[in-house]
Image (tube, helix red, strand yellow):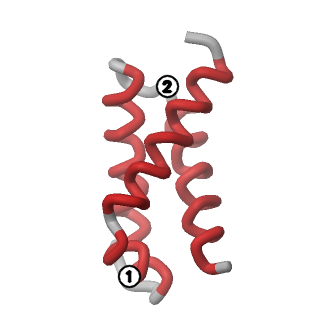
Amino acid sequence: MDEPSVRHEIAAAAQQVISAEPDMVCAWQDGEPGSWGFFAGKVVLASKSRLGRPLSEGERRLAWQTMWDLLVATRA
């Protein structure tokens, strides 16, 4: 799978997680302990599921950054 496809799948996974967890989005916005870890784990699992394989270290970092950026955008 080429890099743009991987980026697309990771972005879709992150959006899927955010859409499925509105209460946790609020918890993250409120700075609740553990809320970031929850999202960090969920986006890796969702990305892995969408890609059908484990993520490389770089892909995990991309997934975390993508999730962070989407969460920050929910504050706007």
Few, some or many residues within 10 Å of mark 2 (<14, 14–19, 20+): few
Residue at point 34%, 19% (across, down): 52
Q: Which residue is mark 2?
A: 56
**Which one is in front, 33 or 5?**
5
24 and 22: which is toward the camera: 22
Q: Amino acid at mark 1?
A: Ala
Vertical position of residue 39 compared to residue 57: above or below: below
Quarter of the figure with residue 35 = bottom left
**Horizontal placement of 44 versus 2: left or right?**
left
Q: Residue furthest top?
A: 1
Of the image marks 2 and 1, the number of the one nearer the N terminus: 1
Q: Residue at x 50, y 40 (%)?
A: 12
Mark 2 residue element? loop
Q: Percent x, y for residue 21?
A: 33, 65
- Point 52% across, 36% down: residue: 10
For discs 2 and 1, the disc positioned in front in the rendered view: 1
Q: Is residue 36 above or below residue 54?
A: below
Which residue corresponds to the image point at 53% horizontal and 54% vertical from the top-left?
Answer: 67
State the residue lying farthest toward the bottom. 30
Label 2 close to label 1 by CB (< 8 Å):
no
Q: Secondary structure at mark 1?
A: helix
**Label 2 vs label 1: CA separation?**
29 Å
**Residue type (three-letter) at the residue carrying disc 2:** Ser
- Disc 1 marks which residue? 27
Q: In which image quadrant can residue 70 be found?
A: bottom right
Q: Does residue 33 lie above or below 67 as drawn?
A: below
Q: Position of residue 4 (x, y in %)?
A: 67, 23
In the image: residue 32, left or right of residue 10: left
Q: Quadrant of the C terminus?
A: bottom right
User: Which residue in the rendered view is the most extreme toward the front?
Assistant: 19
In-image side of 58 versus 60 (left or right): right
CA neighbours of label 1 inside 10 A, class few (<14), some (14 to 19), many (20+): some
